[in-house]
Amino acid sequence: MLAAGGEMPELDCLFCRIVAGGVPAKTVYEDDQALAFEDINPQAPTHLLIIPKRHLPGLAEAAPADAPMVGYLQLLAARLARERRLEQGYRTVLNVGPHAGQSVFHLHLHLLGGRPMAWPPG
Ligand code: AMP
Ligand code: ZN
């Protein structure tokens, strides 16, 4: 199956496999560009992962042409937060590289909400 944008998905990428339907996920939103699903190990009452359908390892690999996609993921997070009535606040997070604990190398935006969150993050 071709990912949105016509590029081949990475066969060994977990999130490309979720996009292709080969690995199950609790999908909460989907369109031609993006997918949002429940994190398998939630760190807050709401913990969604919002990903581009097209494979990109992470923010560090994003090119200027990816700016609309990165912005789109953020605005999608705001929309999902509104729908979940997270009026008290929420956090969107991109973990980038080993010091940030990035463990899946397909760009994903975390949407966390439903509880107070400490600052600075650990
Ligand atoms: P990161 O540490 O920023 O790379 O985040 C990766 C996230 O993916 C973690 O929060 C994991 O709990 C989550 N995750 C790993 N495997 C799955 C899966 N099969 N379905 C949903 N979330 C997953
Ligand atoms: Zn991928």
Image: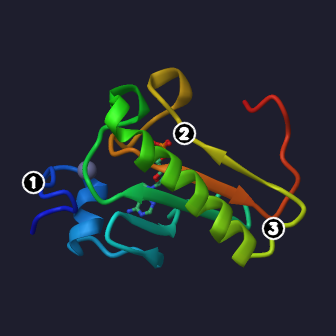
Three-letter code for the amino acid on which mark 2 is drawn: Leu
Some atom of ligand 1 lies within 8 Å of the CB belonging to the residue at label 2: yes
- On the question of residue 26 being in view, the answer is no
Q: Position of residue 79 (x, y in %)?
A: 65, 68
Residue tagged 3: 86
Quadrant in which residue 32 is drawn: bottom left
Q: Do the numbered discs 3 and 2 sit on residues whose CB atoms are within 8 Å? A: no
Quadrant in which residue 51 is drawn: bottom left
First of labels 1, 3 by sequence position: 1
Name the residue rendered at 28%, 55% in the picture: 14
Q: Badge 2 local density, few (<14 within 10 Å), some, or many (20+)?
A: some
Quadrant showing the C terminus: top right
Vertical relation: 57 (above or below) 117: above
Side (left or right) of 62 relative to 71:
left
Name the one closer to the observer, 36 or 117.
Answer: 36
In space, the residues marked 3 and 2 are separated at their CA atoms by 19 Å
Q: Position of residue 91 (x, y in %)?
A: 72, 49
Some atom of ligand 1 lies within 8 Å of the CB belonging to the residue at label 3: no
In space, the residues marked 1 and 2 are separated at their CA atoms by 23 Å
Q: Badge 1 local density, few (<14 within 10 Å), some, or many (20+)?
A: few
Q: Tag on residue 8?
A: 1
Q: Tag on residue 94?
A: 2
Name the residue rendered at 54%, 39% in the picture: 94
Quadrant in which residue 16 is drawn: bottom left
- On the question of residue 14 being in view, the answer is yes
